[in-house]
Image: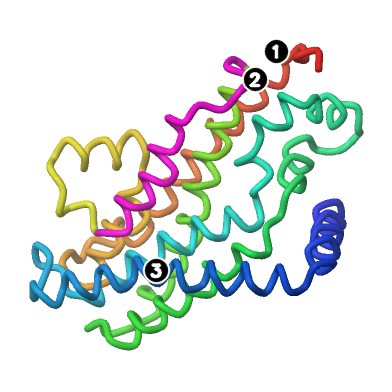
Amino acid sequence: MNLYLKYFKIHLKSEMQYKMSFILSFVSQFFVFFGYYFTIICLFDKFSNLKGFSLYEVLLTFGIIQFGFAFCESFFRGIDQFDRLIVDGGFDRLLLRPQNILLQVFGQEISFVKLSRLFQSIIVLIIAIINIDVVWDIKKVITLICMLISSVLIFLSIFILAASYCFITIKGLEVRNVFTDGGKHMAQYPIGIFKKGFVFFFTYIIPFGFVNYYPLLYLIDKVNNDLYMISPLITILYLIPCIFIFYKGVKKYSSVGS
């Protein structure tokens, strides 16, 4: 962690060299994000519910998924831009250093501008939590915390998996956006509103459903099974093979000769 903190300080100092540019970028990101928020508000201006889910229940799922995506884009941006390291030979230099390779990749880029999206997601979460019709107890608080953690883990897993195929393709493929940006836009709504094929894929292939749908059913008392409370922990089981695949790729990596 000391290594990552050093990367953190370096990137912070770098971005603060141009304070006005940072402030303008931060503010613009802040207002662009709220376009998604107002889209949901406008949707519920026409409909009272979305297949049985109220406005604030949808905002809760929206805030949780945006929290995980923004967190990863802010603090793990390096793995999302991994193809650049492969192409310019930067990954070769990292391999020469006696430090954890994945931690080094994480620290290659930290985006403090993206923190504006993280703050926005927290604001939306607070609005949803205050207004949602839930009787809070210790179990439901734990469920909410697990949902937030699992949201970070699912996007981190996808970023690592997307980085892993760069060992084969060299350059990143745009298809990864189907699972990152596309997954984010899909999972910001309760996935139960979609057709069964989508629900199956985004539950058992990419477990977005265990992040903010099945736990949500427990939160709003649509189910009483405690297994729904701990279902977000499945994302840990998803992360482990993603890390394993990445290190498999590292072992087979033989440089691009840049």
Q: Earlier in the sequence, mark 1 or mark 3?
A: 3
Task: Tell me, for residue 63, which label it has, or none.
Answer: 3
Q: Earlier in the sequence, mark 3 or mark 2?
A: 3
Q: Is residue 177 magenta?
A: yes
Q: Which residue is mark 2?
A: 248
Binning the other alpha carbons within 10 Å of mark 3 as few (below 14), some (14 to 19) or many (20 upward) gives many
In the rendered structure, are the residues bearing label 2 and label 1 in contact, judged by CB atoms less than 8 Å apart?
yes
Residue 89 rendering spot, x and y as whole percentages: 80, 24
Q: Amino acid at mark 2?
A: Lys
Disc 3/disc 2 C-alpha distance (Å): 34 Å
- The image quadrant that residue 92 belongs to is top right
Part of the protein shown in magenta: 168-189
Viewport quadrant of the N terminus: bottom right
Q: Is residue 211 magenta?
A: no
Q: Which residue is mark 1?
A: 252
Q: Amino acid at mark 3?
A: Gly
Binning the other alpha carbons within 10 Å of mark 1 as few (below 14), some (14 to 19) or many (20 upward) gives few
Left or right position of 180 against 140: right
Helix, strand or loop under label 2: helix
Left or right position of 156 against 154: right
Residue 10 rendering spot, x and y as whole percentages: 86, 58
Residue 171 rendering spot, x and y as whole percentages: 60, 23
For the point 52% across and 41% down, the residue is 157
Residue 118 rendering spot, x and y as whole percentages: 54, 68
Q: Nearer the viewer, mark 1 or mark 3?
A: 3
